[in-house]
Image (spheres, rainbow, N blue to C red):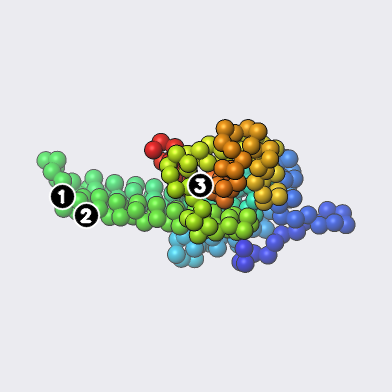
Amino acid sequence: MKCVPSLLFKLGKRKRSLEDTVIRIQQGDSELQNQLIEQYKPFVAKTVSSVCKRYIDETADEFSIGLIAFNEAIEKYSPEKGNSLLAFAELIIKRKVIDYIRKEARSAQTINIELQEHEEGEVSQSKIEADLSIDEFQRLIEQEHRQEEILHFQKVLKEFHLTIADLIDHSPKHIDARQNAIQVAIILVEHEELCKVLFQKKQLPVKQLEKLVSVSRKTVERNRKYIIAMVIILTGDYLYLKDYIKGVLDA
């Protein structure tokens, strides 16, 4: 993340990386957690401002939402999933702030609609326009969510030397083949040690995996890129991309 330099905490004579600091926090160091949150308030404010399309200071409700989301990211972050804390935190902050804006807008629209309804219960033109406005806002919010997920997904794919184009070119052509590949990914995720190997070495542990799945080693290797992508989605915070997996499995 260019807007904030990587934070290094000094412990004795050595320095602790940001990700190492988070692990220490997850082990119960609340003082370090407060230090980290204080240090990254500018990052939170900048991320929230990018969603709101205006400058957000620390007195704004949106900033408080962003700060809570940053703390949530600290608590949920896992370096084994292959993405940096700041990339993960940015995704969580933006999603929480967008959800907050959506709820506030819907609440304000509801109050306005109730005031504009006719006493006899008929719906006014203003209500119809407000409903259309809410639908459009909802569509834009969902579009924003999807864009954020895709951008984050692309960053993680890059760590495996993969691109979206690779997935398009190497995705199984038939629905049953895609379902089988996803089942392989699910089995890998369920085996924590294999999952660690994948994210640490950035390679699919084919030899160990073939002992656990019903498809051949050749099939696993042929669908390697697609399986890796599915594992990334299954272990990540991807609401819309997980809907894709559900859609394939339910087809």
Q: Nearer the viewer, residue 66 or 60?
A: 66
| Badge 3 element | loop
Q: Mark 1 points at which residue?
A: 124
Q: Quadrant of residue 27?
A: top right
| Badge 2 element | helix
Question: What whole-number distance in Å separates the C-alpha atoms at marks 2 and 1?
Answer: 9 Å
Chain-order first, disc 2 or disc 1: 1
Say if 250 sits above or below 98 in the image. Answer: above
Looking at the image, which residue is at 53% across and 36% down?
183
Residue type beneath disc 3: Tyr
Q: Is residue 239 visible?
A: no
Q: Name the residue under label 3.
A: 238
Residue type beneath disc 1: Ser
Q: Are marks 2 and 3 in contact (CB under 8 Å)?
A: no
Q: Nearer the viewer, residue 118 or 247?
A: 247
Q: In the rendering, at what x and y percent does residue 209 appear?
A: 65, 38
Q: Is residue 112 visible?
A: yes
Question: What whole-number distance in Å separates the C-alpha atoms at marks 1 and 3?
Answer: 39 Å
Q: In the rendering, at what x and y percent does residue 11 appear?
A: 83, 53
Residue type beneath disc 2: Glu
Say if 2 sits above or below 67 in the image. Answer: below
Looking at the image, which residue is at 65% across and 51% down?
82
Chain-order first, disc 2 or disc 3: 2
Q: Nearer the viewer, residue 50 or 60?
A: 50
Looking at the image, which residue is at 21% across and 54% down?
129
Question: What whole-number distance in Å separates the C-alpha atoms at marks 2 and 3?
Answer: 32 Å
Looking at the image, which residue is at 15% across and 49% down?
124
Chain-order first, disc 1 or disc 3: 1
Q: Is residue 169 left or right of residue 192?
A: left
Q: Name the residue under label 2.
A: 129
Quarter of the picture containing the C terminus is top left
